[in-house]
Amino acid sequence: MAQADANENKEQREVCPPNVRPVHYSLKYNKIDFVEPFKFEGSVEINLNVVHDTESIVLNGSELDLKKIWVSQNNKKHEIAIDTVKINTDNEQITIPLKEKLTKGNALLSIHFIGNLNDKMKGFYRSKYQSSEKKEVFAGVTQFEAVDARRAFPCWDEPAVKATFTLEITAPKHLAVLSNMPHSNITEHDNNTKTVSFEKTPIMSTYLLAWAIGEFENVESKTKRDIIVRVWTTPGNKHKAEFACEVACKALDFYEKYFDINYPLPKCDMLAVPDFSAGAMENWGLITYREVALLCERDKSSIRSLQYVAIVVCHELAHQWFGNLVTMDWWSQLWLNEGFACFMEYFSADDIFPNWKMWDMFIAGEYNRAFELDGMETSHPIEVEVARAKQADEVFDAISYCKGASIIRMLQTYLGSEIFRKALHKYLKNFQYSNAITNDLWDFLGKESKKPVQDIMKNWTREQGFPMIIVERQNDNIKLTQRRHLTSGKNLTEDQLKVTWNVPISMKISTGKECKMSPILLNERSSTIKFPENAKWIHFNSESTGFYVVSYDEKMITPLIEALKNNDQNLSMIDRVCVIRDTKALASTGIANLTVQLLNLIVACKGETSYPIWDSVLSAAGDISLLIDTDEKTGESFNAIMRDTLSTIYEKLSWNSHQNEDAQQAGLLRPLILSALSKYKHEDVIKEALKRFNDFMVNNNKDAIEASLRSMVFSCAVKYGGKEQFELLRNYYRKTDDPADKSWALRALGYTTKEELIEELLKWILESEEVRSQDKVFPFSVVGSHIKGRELAWKFLQKHWNDWFKKFDGGFMVQHLAKVPQYFVTFEKADEIEKFYSTIDAPQCQRAMQQCVENIRRNAQWRKENIENISKWCKENRAKL
């Protein structure tokens, strides 16, 4: 968003008047109830800068009981009387009318308040855990992003309104008390309590303030510059924190060197919280995480768990610069925080763990998620205006994170790595401890590269969607034409047709002897380039450095497909993923014969051995399977074809790890292949999974299922077993203290195909306290994903929408909730779901609801246009087996 645009839109935002601004908050909590009625009592003194004379003070507050308010100027010599305080619960603003004018200069606002230590995972909330004495107790923790600091204390709860903070908390002596900064003083009292004071913070936004109180233990290490890094856990879990602590030290060292700016705080704490709505939160100096995102064991956990912990830690530490040191101006610029952190998590993890091939994982994960979502009509621009605070949660999605990261990667490739790094250093240095907008970043990148970055990038962030590059062979030339890609296949509107992107296009040209890279910038609707002499094939978007889909004509695609089938080594692994991804994206739009071409591509990959390729192949196969899962005969044929397609890699991998295999590759690939074979009803795989499940659960043989295969075996056993397997797994979920196993077990329960067990499961996850609120929606989503549970999940959602919504009180989780019915494939269901959603007032998930309905309509149209072709293809290809 340009500066002018940003200023214009500020008038529409739900923000406090700019006549008064906080300079410093002195915050005290002198009473916190960790038992009923779960209340906290505190006070805040706010040093104010009165920008111009005013007769009122407006700030944010929600669910707070304001007991006493006073205002003074002139060093507290004169208290200003106030009139009746007005609290607007809709926009969560407190208006304090003054009986005499507050004049320009300094002032002091003091408020005594009582709040709720809630169980909604937002604001200042409670989280249940087991104490060292194995008793069920509660910790007090905070989650303020996006707009929930106002639930903990009255404040100006906007990212651009920065201030400094001092904090003082009184709590039981035996509990650890943590915050952004180190302790400055601890005073013990006779009533078995202590008061902990913390050093003053740097100037920062309210959403980054944090504290936690509980019986925590820690592991500790230091960076090369002696920054103290500690990872805190609930009792009995600190041995699972060592890997994350090691990664954090290496990541901080990496970022300090890369950004050439030191981490500005004296310590970095990271805390595993048993109840947590997001994956993690970058609070400056006190980062909070879901347990599954922080705790693992290097020698026992799966490679997937290790990688997940590593990238989440690297993501949150990247925020200490991008987001904390330099903060976006408003939530419409969220991508400046999240897109960069998502990019940097892979950039840094790739440096720390070079054997992990993290950029391959980026393409298979973040890139593909953004690609699928941004092709939808109900996507949104990276820079999307957020008018109301309650809408802020909606933009924490794959567009802000994954598309943001993808276009940053594209720009870094185009400008060059060192130019990019130098520009980031200057940008961070210039805006440190303040706020920035997107154009500020483009300015620095443009100055450093001497390229028109503003012009190149403006439509990548301001416009919805991404381009389709149409490639046509015209004798000795190649014509390139761009237009917006829509997964629905609908005709573009006039406004959509007007949009053009500046597209950095990389090409890989195979002449039979060598492979050349030749970058160009497509900055107009269409352009013509010379067809290279002796070229066997040309692949556009080599290494998937650009964010676009390529549609080749017959002359261009045929040799490319042949190269893929013939395992041409000049076509890299990521290039193959790109061809499969683009073919799938275009097939869903209804382009003639592409669905059949996609099916041919799937079986052509029979000899492939890499995880990212198989991940893409099986994703495409899963989409086809969804379209035909109500057609039993076609489904049986497709299952047989997929079993044959997977047979070669299955024989190579088998079930057990063995010497001379790439542990990282096999640790990801083996569970992927076995899960697919289970899905496509491979009898031997199902039989072996049930056997290992029984050995693990009944015979207590913990070596029966290696860590990487737990999710696959659990899911297979529940899907093809009965009530016995269901109850064994549910009991395992109740007993295990391994965060990853607990998560896999709960999700796997959703695969049961027995109607009575599905109904029991849905009731249990909604009502039982055995399932934490943070986890409830995930098994529900699994139930909705398969044919036996789809209708039951949808009926349950309609009946209990309000119950589900209250569990989360809005927040991030309702977006997952709104997408539970997305696996239907009929127009009738799309209409039914759309009608139901039209009755629901939930700003936090309106876009998610729209995306759910659009996804159903897209698949229904895809099915309508291609079911006969798919059935015919399945019949013909099964006959060949």
Image (cartoon, rainbow, N blue to C red):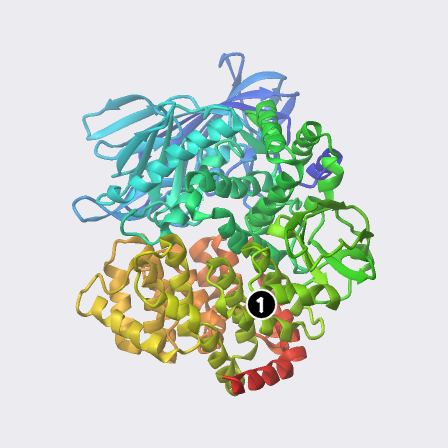
- The N terminus lies in which quarter of the figure? top right
Q: Nearer the viewer, residue 606 or 849?
A: 606
Determine the residue located farthest toward the front in the rendered image: 513
Expressed as whole percent of the image width and height from the top left, the position of residue 841 reads 58, 58
Image point 31% across, 72% down: which residue?
Answer: 689
Closer to us: 394 or 624: 624
Does 476 sit left or right of 195 as displayed?
Answer: right
Question: From the viewer's perspective, is residue 392 above or below residue 833?
Answer: above
622 left or right of 420 in image: left
Give the left or right position of residue 742, taking residue 795 as reference: left
Secondary structure beneath disc 1? helix
Q: How many marks?
A: 1
Residue 24: give x, y in percent of width and height: 49, 22
Q: Residue at (19%, 30%) from the top-left corner?
A: 192
Residue 731 in the image: above or below residue 286 = below
Q: Which residue is mark 1?
A: 565
Residue 536 percent location from the top left of the image: 69, 60
Residue 210 visible? The answer is no
Q: As drawn, is 728 to the left or to the right of 274?
A: left
Q: Residue at x 67, y 45 (%)?
A: 385
Type of amino acid under label 1: Lys
Tell me the crowding category of disc 1: few under 14, some 14 to 19, or many 20 or more residues within 10 angstroms, Cα based: some
Give the residue displayed 69% in from the left and 52% down from the top: 464
Q: Is residue 832 visible?
A: yes
Image coordinates for residue 843, horizontal then vertical, percent: 58, 54
Q: Nearer the viewer, residue 58 or 829?
A: 829
